[in-house]
Image: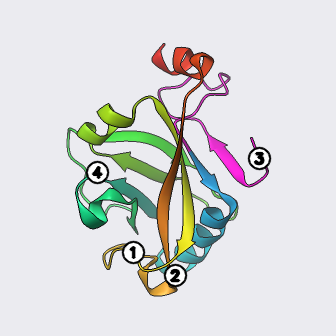
Amino acid sequence: MSGDEREMTAPDAPADAGAARIALSAAATELLRLLHAQHGPLMFHQSGGCCDGSAPMCYPAGEFRTGSSDVLLGLLSVEGVPEPVEFWMSGDQFARWRHTHLTVDVVPGRGSGFSLEAPEGVRFLIRSRLFTEEERALLDD
């Protein structure tokens, strides 16, 4: 793992397994600190829908109502932020991406008007890679 990425263990992974479904880039970590200072506790949701729903959307914690089909991928720890940032994904999207490790990153540009980073001139996006066989075995247990 590079120094730019902070690995977070998903709730369904053994704590000592070293496998995780979701991580943050250094840029995403820094932006989450800024957004937390402005808005308080945060959460992500990624619906997998068209347009803006394809990107991870950042909301004040609890503002987006998750449903019974949504999957909690992980609790992201951000240095300097007292509570973890939940990362939720729609069940349909998770079914398609279950075999991938996801990293939340930040790039210049305009994202969704509903996501908290929109006024900052940047947007969150997901970078992905396939899990190794070892990671898949740990997460599937």
Is disc 3 placed on a helix, strand or loop? loop
Q: Which residue is mark 4?
A: 48
* Few, some or many residues within 10 Å of mark 3 (<14, 14–19, 20+): few
Any part of residue 139 in sight: yes
Q: Which residue is mark 3?
A: 2
Q: Which residue is mark 1?
A: 111
Contact (CB < 8 A) between labels 1 and 2? no
Q: Which marked residue is nearer to the observer: mark 3 or mark 2?
A: 3
Of the residues under marks 1 and 4, which one precedes in the sequence? Answer: 4
Residue 38, label in figure: 2
**Is 92 or 62 nearer to us in this picture?**
92
The Cα–Cα distance between marks 3 and 2, rounded to whole angstroms, is: 29 Å
The Cα–Cα distance between marks 1 and 2, rounded to whole angstroms, is: 18 Å
Q: What secondary structure characterizes most of the magenta part? A: loop
State the extent of the magenta-drawn residues as a range.
1-22
Is disc 4 placed on a helix, strand or loop? loop
Q: Which marked residue is nearer to the observer: mark 4 or mark 2?
A: 4
Is disc 2 placed on a helix, strand or loop? helix
Of the residues under marks 1 and 2, which one precedes in the sequence? Answer: 2
Contact (CB < 8 A) between labels 4 and 2? no
Of the residues under marks 4 and 2, which one precedes in the sequence? Answer: 2
Work out whether 57 lies above or below 97: below
Of the residues under marks 3 and 2, which one precedes in the sequence? Answer: 3
Q: Position of residue 109 (x, y in %)?
A: 48, 79
Of the residues under marks 3 and 4, which one precedes in the sequence? Answer: 3
